[in-house]
Image (tube, rainbow, N blue to C red):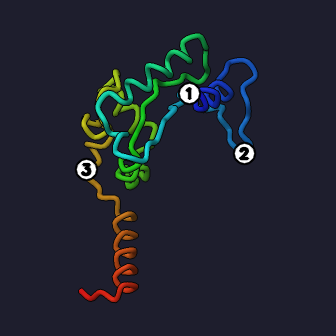
């Protein structure tokens, strides 16, 4: 978490922020720090609240521009489920809608209604499904299994 805070501080400090080569941050008004967790712990109730508590201890003495949101953690599977939406729903809108409904960060990502996604309808992560099917076929062929 300290590494993430250090990066936020370097990019969002009001005086002399660091630059990222070939990335223009001038139009950015809000910065969404995010911890992506690989195992099931990432969807535990209160985990984001716990991590955000410690993140806020680091942030509270600083002033940032752009604004820095409270810190959520997200399970990688949750992000994979979001993969079909960026075509017409910016990730920032999805995150803002999600966390406006759970400001304390107590709940797992999908346990809270997301107004940005409801209007788009349920979309399966097609690419992940297709690649999973290809992997299954490859393993079956390699093991000599038949349907």
Position of 126 with respect to 17 (left or right) is: left
Marks 3 and 1, Cα distance to the nearest angstrom?
28 Å
**Label 1 Cα crowd, 10 Å radius (few <14 / some 14-19 / many 20+):** few
For marks 2 and 1 on the same chain, the one whose residue lies earlier in the sequence: 2
* Element on which disc 1 rests: loop
**Residue drawn at 51 percent across, 15 percent down:** 57
For marks 3 and 2 on the same chain, the one whose residue lies earlier in the sequence: 2
For marks 3 and 1 on the same chain, the one whose residue lies earlier in the sequence: 1
| Quadrant in the picture for the N terminus | top right
Residue 101 to residue 111: above or below:
above
Q: Which residue is mark 2?
A: 22
**Residue drawn at 54 percent across, 12 percent down:** 60
The picture places residue 42, in percent across and down from the top left corner, at: 37, 40
Marks 3 and 2, Cα distance to the nearest angstrom?
35 Å
Q: Which residue is mark 1?
A: 29
| Quadrant in the picture for the C terminus | bottom left
Q: Which residue is mark 3?
A: 121
The picture places residue 90, in percent across and down from the top left corner, at: 44, 43
Residue farthest to the top, as pictured: 61
Which quadrant of the structure image shows residue 72? top left
The picture places residue 54, in percent across and down from the top left corner, at: 48, 20
Residue 59 to residue 105: above or below:
above
């Amino acid at each position: 978490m300290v590494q993430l805070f250090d990066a936020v501080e370097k990019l969002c400090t009001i005086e002399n922020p660091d630059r990222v080569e070939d990335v223009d941050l001038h139009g950015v008004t809000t910065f969404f720090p995010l911890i992506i967790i690989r195992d099931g712990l990432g969807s535990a109730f209160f985990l984001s609240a716990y991590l955000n508590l410690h993140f806020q201890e680091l942030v509270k003495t600083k002033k940032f521009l752009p604004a820095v949101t409270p810190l959520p953690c997200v399970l990688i599977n949750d992000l994979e489920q979001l993969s079909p939406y960026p075509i017409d729903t910016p990730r920032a809108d999805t995150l803002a809608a999600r966390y406006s409904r759970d400001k304390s960060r107590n709940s797992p990502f999908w346990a809270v209604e997301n107004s940005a996604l409801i209007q788009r309808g349920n979309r399966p992560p097609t690419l992940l499904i297709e690649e999973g099917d290809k992997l299954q076929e490859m393993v079956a062929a390699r093991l000599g299994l038949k349907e």
